[in-house]
Amino acid sequence: MSPVFERRIREHRARMLVRSLDYRQRRHARGVWFRLRRVLAEAGAAFVIPEDEARTLIAEGHRPEPVGQELEPPKLIVMASSARIAQIASAQPVPVRLGGELLAATCLALTPFETTG
Amino acid sequence: MTFRDRLVATIQAARSVLEDPGVLIVGSEVPNLLEPGAASTLVVSQDLDIGIPVDCHAAVKRRLPELIVHFRPSPDEPSVWTPRSSGLLEVNFVGMDPKQDPADAYVLEDDQFPLLVFGALSLVVPGVEIDIAGTRIRVPRPAGLLLEKLVTDRTGEKGDRDLLVALGLLMAAGPADLDELDGAYRRLRPELRHTVRSNLTLLSLIEARTGMPDPRPRRADVAALLRRLETGGEGLR
């Protein structure tokens, strides 16, 4: 076998082993990034909010996303309607991606995609 | 000379192989070729991936001498043929075996024409024939190619671009294509289904890139696809 092909097959199988490990551990700490991405994938927009506002949202019945407590330091991540978040004057929009602004936030409010029709 | 000119010229130069029944163009150039008039506006790597079903290997091998005029086998990479002219792109041959496990890979050994056979390409199904400047080529059905893109590990800049190619396919997919994707997804084993959904979450969060479909206006569609694939309970995740 060509050494190039041999190397590529070896690398492919190594990637498959890592992927299997990721899958087996998906419900453990290793799976936290998938769970965080999965929550963010449902968000049309994201906002950094003060902790007291996040606590108020939870007190109103908005459920904190469990994945926020799986991170260190932990985050309060709450999904709420756009109309409700618009009432929080200090809410700062941040891009919905795994960037510095979002990851540095202690409290995040997410809003669902607007539906039409 | 534009990139499209080079892509079209490469297809014409590889005509003897591409017109062999069973041979497919796979990879990132497919969305470029599916644009109206094969406009080729996406910024992708400068090569043309040609999928060779293992059953067609002998027939394609017989046609290789006709390629020698335009290409030469790379001394470094047995699957790559480099162009003799700057007006052409590299050609990269990959093997396809419909009976293969999607996570597996093997080498189809041959002194003159060895092929790496990646299992993810077993998900690709022949689709329509299109005419590119007089050369008839066959491209995969969108659902299978989309699933192939989503079932493969995607990391780094190339990984992001491959996912944006998948987005281009998703944008072009109609309801029947999504039904077909959904059905094929449900036939995958759980680990591969997880990879598909993991790649969709990555696609949802990557930044826009010049010359590629912008994922931001399509995030709601990606979320809807994720929810659809998850319908049916934990067993389908």
Image (cartoon, helix red, strand yellow):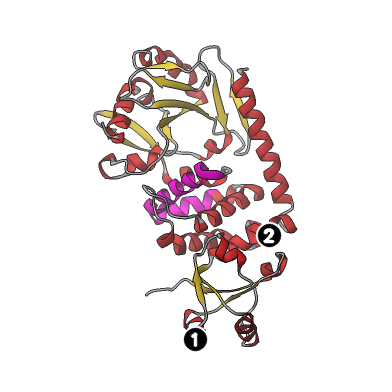
Q: Judge by depth and name the residue closer to the eye, B113 or B57.
A: B113
In the rendered view, tell whether residue B117 sits above or below residue B81. Answer: below
Provide the residue span drawn in magenta: B155-184
Tag 1, which secondary structure?
loop
Q: Earlier in the sequence, mark 2 or mark 1?
A: 2
Q: Are marks 2 and 1 in contact (CB under 8 Å)?
A: no
Residue B163: in magenta span: yes
**In this view, the mark in front (2 or 1):** 1
Q: How many marks?
A: 2
Q: Main secondary structure of the magenta part?
A: helix
The residue nearer to you, when weighing A76 against A14, is A76
Which chain is disc 2 placed on?
Answer: A
- Which residue shows up at 37% across the image and 26% down it? B18
Please name the amino acid that badge 1 sits on. Answer: Gln
Classify mark 1: residues with Cα within 10 Å, few (<14), some (14-19) or many (20+): few
- Return the residue at label 1: A87
The numbered disc on residue A32 is 2
